[in-house]
Image: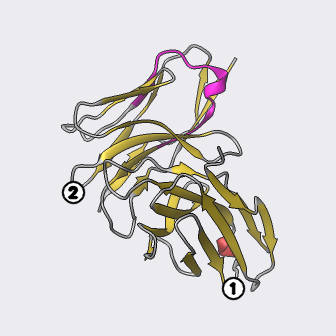
Amino acid sequence: NAGVTQTPKFQVLKTGQSMTLQCAQDMNHNSMYWYRQDPGMGLRLIYYSASEGTTDKGEVPNGYNVSRLNKREFSLRLESAAPSQTSVYFCASSLGFGPTNTEAFFGQGTRLTVV
Amino acid sequence: GDSVTQMEGPVTLSEEAFLTINCTYTATGYPSLFWYVQYPGEGLQLLLKATKADDKGSNKGFEATYRKETTSFHLEKGSVQVSDSAVYFCALSLYGGSQGNLIFGKGTKLSVKP
């Protein structure tokens, strides 16, 4: 029972390099999310996809792009990494998008360091 | 805007002590409320939830009651264990907006000593 799977778990990038974080869920969920977690800041939403075929900006989208490849997969791309993007990134999914249907399931996280 | 405020940590308790972590919220609509827990090196997992006023969520000895009149959802446990050491996040959910679906507090780190 995999749930939400993120790859990679750890990554070190040099400033200006690009990379894509992969996320897949096997729970037939409609909605998927990317968060970043920084000390003292809690979780901040980067982008979300309320349903297959749609994506929307969250609270901190600058410097990132996303692709909802299909219902299962939602990737996050850093085109030109900056030290300010050093963080732990979490992918999450939920069955729906609304107050009564929002139990979110999280991946294990990707610890990204940009030097 | 919509937001969640929870008590700052870290909170350090001895085993079998009583735990309260305060959480208050601001929301324009009628949110659902959640507590998530994050164990070291892991992602967040749902601990409990409440979807309407006066509901009580409970799980693994933890409880929280949705209080609309005080806009609060405080987390309590009567007797904590070392294994409860983790970071606890209060969250609310509403439709849409730049914060998407779930709005999180900043988290409270709990350490339980034997």
Residue B106 got which mark?
A: none
CB under 8 Å between discs 2 and 1: no
Q: Answer above or below: position of B102 versus A11.
A: above
Question: Which element carries disc 1, helix, strand or loop?
Answer: loop
- Residue occupying the point 38% across, 70% down: B98
Q: How is the image coloured?
A: secondary structure
Residue A80 got which mark?
A: 1
Q: Position of residue B103 (x, y in %)?
A: 40, 55
- Residue occupying the point 25% across, 34% down: B67
Asked if residue B109 is among those painted magenta in the image, a careful observer would answer no
Residue A79 as seen in the image, left or right of residue B32: right
Instruction: Judge whether residue A34 can be spotted in this image.
Output: yes
Q: Quadrant of the C terminus of chain A?
A: bottom right
- Residue occupying the point 67% across, 68% down: A22
**Which amino acid type is shown beneath numbered disc 2?**
Thr
Query: Magenta span covers which residues?
Result: B75-89
**Which amino acid type is shown beneath numbered disc 1?**
Ser
Residue B28 got which mark?
A: 2
Q: Position of residue A71 (x, y in %)?
A: 52, 66
